[in-house]
Image (cartoon, rainbow, N blue to C red):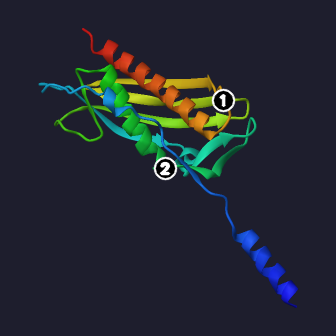
Amino acid sequence: MRYLAFIAVFMLAACSSTPDKAYYQLPINATKIQEQANTTGRNQIWVQRITLSDMLAANGIAYQTTDVSYTNASSHVWASPLDQQLAQALVVDLSTALPNRLVALQPLESQPDTLDITLTGFHGRYDGHVIIQGYWTFSHDSQIIRRSFDLALEQTEDGYPALVRTLSTGWQQVANSIANEIESSSRP
């Protein structure tokens, strides 16, 4: 009888154990931001919103398993909400690329330029590629610029840490393309 009780307790313990969770944060190099002099006029870019598709809004890192199937990892999760991480990284990258503009996550001027981004893809894929897809909208006075982006980067190493690093690299590329478009649209 004791033997059966021991087996029952052992089975319950085995069934109740869950794998350890690993938490991931996009690498952000905040030291890249230079101190900015006081600026006059409309120089602020307000990163107003980053909207994620439902799949990306989950805690788990998204992964495409087939051409039509996706999953969210249960043991490999974002350390903080993905939209917040993306916004923080975007502020750093845009501030670096546009040193004469003040980029912030809140409006600091009465009528700042605004930037909204919608992400439909920010995930790994079964063929070893990392996908970053979506579109952004930049509003300046009465001018509105809307552009889409669709990146497929090769993940050179296996594992979630490499996936997160590749996603970060792709996000920097998106930020640089946004900065280039904003810079060229502001030239007379």
Q: How far from the left and from the top, in percent, is residue 73?
A: 64, 49
User: Residue reaching furthest top?
Assistant: 188
Q: Toward which corner of the image does residue 162 lie, by quadrant?
A: top right
User: Residue reaching furthest bottom?
Assistant: 1
Q: Which residue has dot 2 on it?
A: 79
Q: Which residue has dot 1 on it?
A: 157
User: In terms of secondary structure, where does tag 1 sit?
Assistant: loop
User: In terms of secondary structure, where does tag 2 sit?
Assistant: loop
Identify which residue is drawn at 26% across, 21% down: 99
Q: How far from the left and from the top, in percent, is residue 47?
A: 33, 36
User: Could you say which is closer to the camera, residue 146 or residue 78?
Assistant: 78
Q: How far from the left and from the top, in percent, is residue 79?
A: 49, 50
Q: Residues within 10 Å of mark 1 (few under 14, many from 20)?
A: few
Quick one: label 2 or label 1, which is nearer the N terminus?
A: 2
**120 relative to 127 in the view: left or right:** left
- Estimate the spatial distance between the alpha carbons at disc 2 and disc 1, rounded to whole Å: 21 Å
Identify which residue is drawn at 30% across, 26% down: 95
